[in-house]
């Protein structure tokens, strides 16, 4: 069992920055791929970013590439999402998740076994 808790969401003006954190507890954290997804009202949950167990490999959705950075600190059992140059279209509930099945596609929602409760990010014009 893994518990994930996001923090760091809030309201920011367009062009601003926020840093989301996701703290994990339970089973070994450092062995697994982690991901961030987001869901805007009336839309499906979509992939944002993912990071390998070592932090050596990352991948981003085209819509956030160059603006968002995913990182992790295995000693703190935490994963982060630094969001810069925020746009109103980034407004959504942001979720972190852990993928425990090796070889699964980290861009797919169904690759992830556990999810956090979400953190709201609102970007105003």
Image (tube, rainbow, N blue to C red):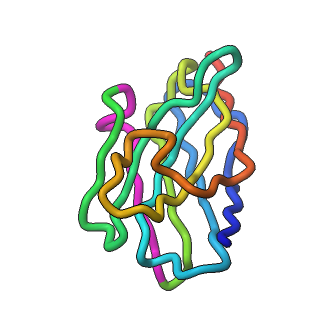
Residue that protrudes farthest toward the left in the picture: 56
| 27 up-or-down from 59: above or below | below
- The one of 63 and 82 positioned closer to us in this rendering: 63
Q: Is residue 48 left or right of residue 62?
A: right
Q: Quadrant of residue 124?
A: top right
From the viewer's side, name the closer residue of 105 and 40.
105
- The answer to whether 51 is drawn above or below residue 66 in the figure is below
Say how many tags the image has: 0
What is the x, y in percent for residue 39?
62, 29
Please give the range of residues in magenta: 63-74
Q: Quadrant of residue 31?
A: bottom left
Residue at 31% x, 28% y is 62
Q: Nearer the viewer, residue 83 or 48?
A: 48
**Residue 75 in the image, given as x and y percentages of width and height:** 49, 85
Where does the image place residue 101, in percent across and percent down from the top left?
42, 62
Q: Quadrant of the N terminus?
A: bottom right
Residue 84 image point, x, y percent: 45, 40
Residue at position x 63%, y 71% from top? Answer: 24
Q: Work out which quarter of the rendered image holds the C terminus and state it.
A: top right
Which residue shows up at 51% across the image and 76% down it? 29
Q: Residue at x 51, y 23 (%)?
A: 87
| Residue 96 within the magenta-colored segment of the rendering | no
| Nearer the observer, 73 or 34 | 34
């Amino acid at each position: 069992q893994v518990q994930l808790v996001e923090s760091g969401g809030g309201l920011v003006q367009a062009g601003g920055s926020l840093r989301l954190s996701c703290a994990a507890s339970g089973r070994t954290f450092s062995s697994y791929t982690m991901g961030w997804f987001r869901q805007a009202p009336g839309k499906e949950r979509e992939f944002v970013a993912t990071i390998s167990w070592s932090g050596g490999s990352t991948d981003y959705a085209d819509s956030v590439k160059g603006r968002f950075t995913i990182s992790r600190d295995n000693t703190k059992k935490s994963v982060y999402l630094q969001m810069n140059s925020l746009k109103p279209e980034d407004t959504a509930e942001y979720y972190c998740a852990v993928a425990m099945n090796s070889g699964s596609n980290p861009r797919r929602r169904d690759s992830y076994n556990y999810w956090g409760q979400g953190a709201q990010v609102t970007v105003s014009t």
